[in-house]
């Protein structure tokens, strides 16, 4: 009988590539503290051979593209010391974000269109390592009341054969802070200057991630971005805010979420031009809630539809 492989014995290490698609071997400092991991060991397109025989029966298929995917969550948390980059900084860079670090002050992430970086990912499960090169991805944030907020990542990258390495890699999670629960003490959200009683906030980079496998080309590309958000909160009187009218005229309003406590374990998401979409209603504890979908629109300068400050 074979020895079981324990899924709870997992380490995920991610390193920025100097050259896109050229694998970099990560070290302990590249470890990512993750949860909710879904590893797809082999993905790709299969084509039916279409063979005709003098009897019924399946024809063989052939894999004509090969790649690998991994999805996971990371705590929506800040840093231990002002000016440090959070442990999830490297992940944002491979999701088409720039990083501007001001020592001893803050780190700001913003969207980019050109020069998108890539990462090598080593996912080791109980001594078996699944590698990806040239990986790029998309990220969402889910910040719900009475829950632990999380970044939710999905990466696509080049396929490598599975390797049996035996030992688990060394890891160092010191860059990761404990995310705080979402509540009145730790979280605030302002939409068009209104301090909303929010039960749920969602934010999606909206990257279009495609895998290209052509003659002389095997890459993962980010070919577009349409960032969105949504906020669910206690409905207001129309004299306070008329969300229906704002949707009718496609109003663009500022959005600001701040989550965390103390001087440094905070994350802020800002969008200066959040276009109000068609609201919907729901019931929570007998109270009417309203969900407002938002499209995050860039200015004429571009690459500024949102920013993340830590």
Image: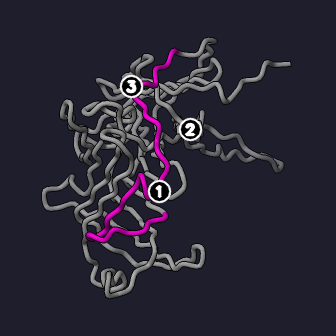
**Residue tagged by mark 3?**
15
- Please tell me whether mark 3 or mark 1 is closer to you in this view: 1
**Residue tagged by mark 2?**
35
On screen, residue 54 above or below 35: below
Magenta stretch in the rendered image: 170-199
**Residue tagged by mark 1?**
183
Residue placed farthest to the right in the image? 1
The stretch drawn in magenta includes residue 195: yes
Nearest the eye: 107 or 157: 107
Percent x, y of residue 83: 24, 32
Nearest the eye: 301 or 20: 301
Q: Quadrant of the C terminus?
A: top left
Percent x, y of residue 244: 37, 84
Nearest the eye: 181 or 34: 181
Is residue 81 visible in this depiction of the protein? yes
Percent x, y of residue 23: 40, 21
Give the CA separation, mark 3 to mark 1: 34 Å
Residue drawn at x 38%, y 62% as measured from the top left: 229
On screen, residue 240 above or below 179: below
Nearest the eye: 83 or 243: 83
Give the CA separation, mark 2 to mark 3: 19 Å
The reply, left or right, for residue 278 in relation to residue 56 is left
């Amino acid at each position: 009988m074979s020895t079981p492989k324990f899924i709870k014995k997992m380490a995920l290490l991610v390193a920025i590539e100097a050259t896109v698609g050229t694998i970099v071997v990560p070290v302990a400092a590249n470890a990512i503290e993750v949860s909710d991991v879904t590893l797809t060991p082999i993905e790709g397109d299969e084509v039916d051979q279409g063979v005709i025989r003098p009897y019924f029966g399946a024809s063989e298929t052939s894999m004509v593209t090969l790649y690998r995917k991994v999805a996971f969550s990371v705590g929506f948390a800040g840093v231990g010391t002002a000016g440090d980059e959070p442990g999830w900084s490297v992940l944002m860079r491979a999701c088409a974000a720039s990083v501007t670090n001001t020592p001893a002050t803050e780190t700001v992430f913003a969207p980019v269109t050109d020069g998108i970086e890539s990462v090598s990912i080593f996912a080791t499960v109980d001594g078996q390592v699944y590698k990806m090169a040239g990986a790029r991805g998309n990220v969402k944030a889910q910040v719900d009341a009475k829950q632990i907020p999380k970044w939710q990542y999905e990466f696509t990258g080049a396929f490598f054969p599975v390797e049996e390495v035996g030992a688990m890699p060394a890891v160092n999670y010191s860059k990761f802070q404990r995310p705080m629960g979402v509540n009145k003490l730790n979280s605030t959200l302002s939409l068009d200057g209104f301090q909303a009683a929010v039960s749920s906030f969602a934010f999606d980079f909206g990257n279009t991630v495609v895998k290209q496998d052509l003659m002389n080309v095997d890459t993962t590309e980010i070919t577009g971005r349409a960032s969105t958000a949504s906020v669910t909160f206690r409905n207001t009187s129309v004299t306070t805010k008329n969300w229906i009218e704002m949707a009718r005229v496609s109003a663009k309003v500022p959005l600001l979420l701040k989550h965390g406590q103390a001087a440094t374990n905070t994350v802020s998401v800002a969008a200066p031009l959040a276009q109000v979409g068609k609201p919907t209603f729901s019931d929570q504890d007998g109270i009417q809630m309203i969900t407002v979908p938002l499209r995050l629109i860039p200015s004429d300068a571009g690459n500024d539809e949102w920013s993340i400050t830590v």
